[in-house]
Amino acid sequence: MDLSKRKFKDDYKKMMTEVYSMDISEAEPTEQFFVLGNLVRTYSSKNWSHTNQVYVENKQKQTYYFSMEFLLGRMLKSNLLNLGILNTVRDGLYDLGIDLETIVQMEPDPGLGNGGLGRLAACFIDSMATSEIPGHGNGIRFKYGLFKQKFVNGYQVELPENWLQNGNVWETRKMHAAVTVRLYGKVWLEKTASGVLEPHYEGAQKVLAVPYDTAVIGYKNDVVNTLRLWSAEVPAQDESTDYWSFIHQRNQIESISEVLYPDDSNYEGRLLRLKQEYFFVSAGVQSIIRHYKKMRVPMLHLAEKVAIHINDTHPALSVPELMRILLDEEKMDWEHAWNVTVNVMSYTNHTIMSEALEKWPIDMISTLLPRIYQIICEIDRRFTMKMSTLFDPSIVERTRIIECGHVKMAHLAIIGSHSINGVAQLHTTILKEKVLHDFYLIYPSKFNNKTNGITQRRWLMLANEPLCNLINRKIGNDWETTPTELKMLKAFRDDEKTLIELAKIKHQNKERFAKHIQKTMGLVLNPDAIFDVQIKRLHAYKRQLLNLLHILSLYFQLKDHPEADLHPRVFIFGAKAAPSYTYAKQIIKLINSVADLINQDTTIKEKLKIVFVENYGVSLAEKIIPAADISEQISLASKEASGTSNMKLMLNGAITLATLDGANVEIRDRVGSNNIIIFGLREEEVYQYYHDGSYHSKSYYDRNPVLRRVLNALIDGTIPDAEAEGRSVFDSLVYYGDEYFVLRDFDAYSAAQKQIDQLYRDTLKWQRMALINIAGAGTFSSDYTVQQYASQIWDVFSRIRDI
Ligand code: 26Y
C-alpha cells in the first residue's frame, strides 16, 4: 500500500487519541503496540472486504485448510512487511521517539501449535495469500496455547500460556456467523413417505461455535484471506434453565476450546480431544456450506467451488460431517453425496510413527457422535463390500476403517479423500511402499508428494535483515516473489568480497544472539565459536541424544588433552517435551546437567559451551536461526517425515549436518554432496535391520571404548545430579535395544563432526558452502508448495487479477 511517513505519523497519533485518549509520550510500550496493531488493521480492512467481495462475485473456488494447529508467531512485523510499509512505519515511529523493535516484543506469541505441523499450516496461509490463492485456515481458538516451558533444577516444568490475557488485536469476533455443533444424544432413522431414511435426534448437547477471524495479508498484492478460529460457547438458554446446571454445562462446553493438547506424534485417546476435533470440523464445514448456499449453485457442484484440506488425521471427521450435511440436510442420496465428498477432501500425512496414528474406541465415538458413527459404519461397509470383489481379503481386512473396536482415522481420511500426500519425496515413497502400501495398491493414483516449504518472508526477510540487504545488493529483490531467483547468488561463489561479507553478517547475528543469551541466561558465548544448532521437539527419534553423547566425547577428549586442537563450539538446543513423555523429559534433564558440568568447567578453556534455551518457539527460532553455523538434522533415517527447520537454517546460511531422512535428501540433491555433511544409516539399512533383527546395541558399547566411556558417564556420577535419568537413558541404549540406532550411528556422526571442525577453519570455503545453501533454498519456499497443492490437488487458481 502507499503510505507516506507523514501520513503514518498523523494516523498513529490520531489512533492513540481515539483508543487511549492520550498523547504518545504518555503511552507505555504495550499501549504503543496495541495502537499500532489497530492501525494496521484499518490499513488492511479495505482489502480484506474487497478480497471477499471479489471471491463472491466471481464465485471462485475456495480452499479451506483444516488444521488443529496454526503456529503463527507474532504478527505485527509480518503484517507490516506484507503491506509493504515496514520501513515507513519504523522510520515514522523513530521520529515519534518510539523503537519498533521494543513494541514488537509486546505482542504475545500465539503458540497454537506443537511443532512442524502447526508451523507448516502458518507458512501455508501466508503463502496462499501471497500466491493469490483463495485459501483460508480453519482451526480452534485455544484459550491456552502450548505450555510455557521453564527449567527448574534442569527439569522441564510446564506453565499455562495465557496468550489472550491482554486481548488479541488481530482478531474479529463474528457473532453473526456462529453455528451450532451437536454432541451426544440419541439418533434413529425413520422412513419418510417418499421412502428415504430421515434421522431423528433426541437429547443432544448443543455447543455454540463462535468464529474469530484474523486477516491473512498477502505480500504486497492487496489480497487478504481469512484465518477462522472457533471458540466454544454456551448457546442462549431458555428461562427454565437451572442456574447450577447452566454453570456445569458452561464449564463443560468452554473446556472444548480451552487448551491445545501438548502431544505431538504420541496419540492418547482422550474424549476431550475427540470433542475438539469434531467441534472445529463441524463448525468449519457448516460455515462453508452456509456460505456456498448464498451462491445458489446446486449442492451437487460443491466440489467445483470448495476444497477442504485435512492436515493430518486430526480433522478427518470432515469426511462423515460433510456426508451428514449432504445426506440429512440436503437430502442427497448416498452415491452422489459420497462422490461430492471425496472430490472435496484431500489429506496430508505427516508421520510414519505408529504411535501418532489416531484411532478412537467405537464406544467413545458412538456415544459422543451417534450420527457420525452411523455414517462411518456405512462408509466402512460399502468400502469393504466393494473392495472385497476386487482385492485379496487380507488387504481389505487391513484397510478397513473399523477394526478391533476402533475407528482408524487415517483410513477414514484416505478412503474419503481424492488425494493423499506425503511431505517429502522419501516420506511419500515410504508411505507408498511400506506404511500405506495396501492403500497404494487400492488407490495408486490418489498418492502424491508435496515437499514441505517455509515462507521466506518470516524466515529471511524478517528474521535476518542484514542478510537480506546483502542479497538485494548482489542480485536485486526479485527473489522476494520468485524465491528460486536466489540461485543468482551462485555467481558470487568465488567472489571473496561477498564471502567475507557473508561471514561478517553471520558474525553479527551471532553477537546479537550471544547478547540475548547473556541477558536472559547470564551465559557468555564466544561469537568466534561454531554455533551448532538443534531446535525441534524433543523426541527419541530426532536423536538429541546422539548430539549429547558426541558432546560428552568432545568433553572427555579435552579433559584428556587440554591442548587438543578443537575449534571452540557452542551447542544450542531448543526443545519442548510432551508433558507425559517421560523419556523425552529425562533427556532434557540430562542435557541440562551436562550443560552445568561443561559450562562450569574452567579447565577446558571455554572450548565447549551448551545453551539449552527455555521455552523454544517461533520467536526464539527467529533469533537463533540467523546465528546458526550448523543445522543438526540427525533423526534416524525414515523417521522424520520432512523437517522444516532444515529449510529455515539452510536459507540463513547454516550448513546441514544430516542423515538422509525427510527433506534432507532433497536439500542434498539441491546443494550437492560437497555442500552438506551426510552421515549415518540409510533408510534401506534401517529397514534391513528391522527385517533381520540383527542390531545388537550392546556390542557397540562393548567394542567401542570412546562410546563406552561416554555411556558410563551417564551412570558413574560424572554428570551431576542426574543419576536416575542417566541410568534410564543408559539402559534404553545398552540393554533395551536402542530403538533409534543411536549407538550404531555414533562413530559416523563423530567423524562428520570432525570434518566440520576442519572445514570451518577455512572461512572462504565455509562461506562458499553457506552461499550455495542460501542460493539453493528458494526451491523450498512454501509459495511453491502451496502453488503445487493449488494446481495439482485443490484445483483452485487465482483469478483476482482478472477483474
Ligand atoms: C495425534 C496427536 C497427538 C498429534 C499431534 C500433533 C500427532 C502429531 C502431531 C504433530 C506432528 C508433526 O508436527 N509432524 C511434523 O510435521 C512436519 C510438517 O509436515 C514435518 O516436517 C515433520 O517431519 C513432522 O514430524
Image: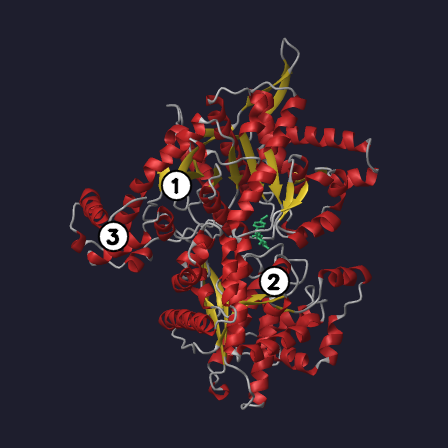
Disc marking residue 62? none
Q: Is residue 680 above or below residue 327?
A: below
Q: Secondary structure at mark 1?
A: strand
Q: Earlier in the sequence, mark 2 or mark 3?
A: 3
Q: Are marks 2 and 1 in contact (CB under 8 Å)?
A: no
Res. 383 visible in picture: yes
- Judged left or right of residue 400, residue 40 is left
Instruction: Please tell me whether residue 796 is drawn above or below residue 502 in the rendered image.
Output: above
Q: Which residue is mark 3?
A: 32
Query: Which residue is under mark 1?
Result: 215
Crowding at label 3, few (<14), some or many (≥20) Cα neighbours within 10 Å? Answer: many
Query: Dot 2 surroundings within 10 Å: few (below 14), some, or many (20 or more)?
Result: many
Residue type, label 1: Ala
- The image quarter in which residue 327 lies: top right
Total marks in image: 3
Q: Which amino acid type is shown beneath numbered disc 2? A: Lys
Tell me how far mark 2 sits from mark 1, CA to CA: 35 Å
Secondary structure under tag 3 reads helix
Classify mark 3 as within 8 Å of ligand 1 or not, answering yes or no. no
Residue at the (65%, 65%) spot, across then down: 659
Q: Which mark is residue 542?
A: 2
Expressed as whole percent of the image width and height from the top left, the position of residue 641 reads 63, 54
Residue 107 against residue 656 in the figure, above or below: above
Earlier residue among tags 2 and 1: 1
Measured in 3D between alpha carbons, the distance from the residue under mark 1 to the one under mark 3, in whole angstroms, is 21 Å
Element under disc 2: helix
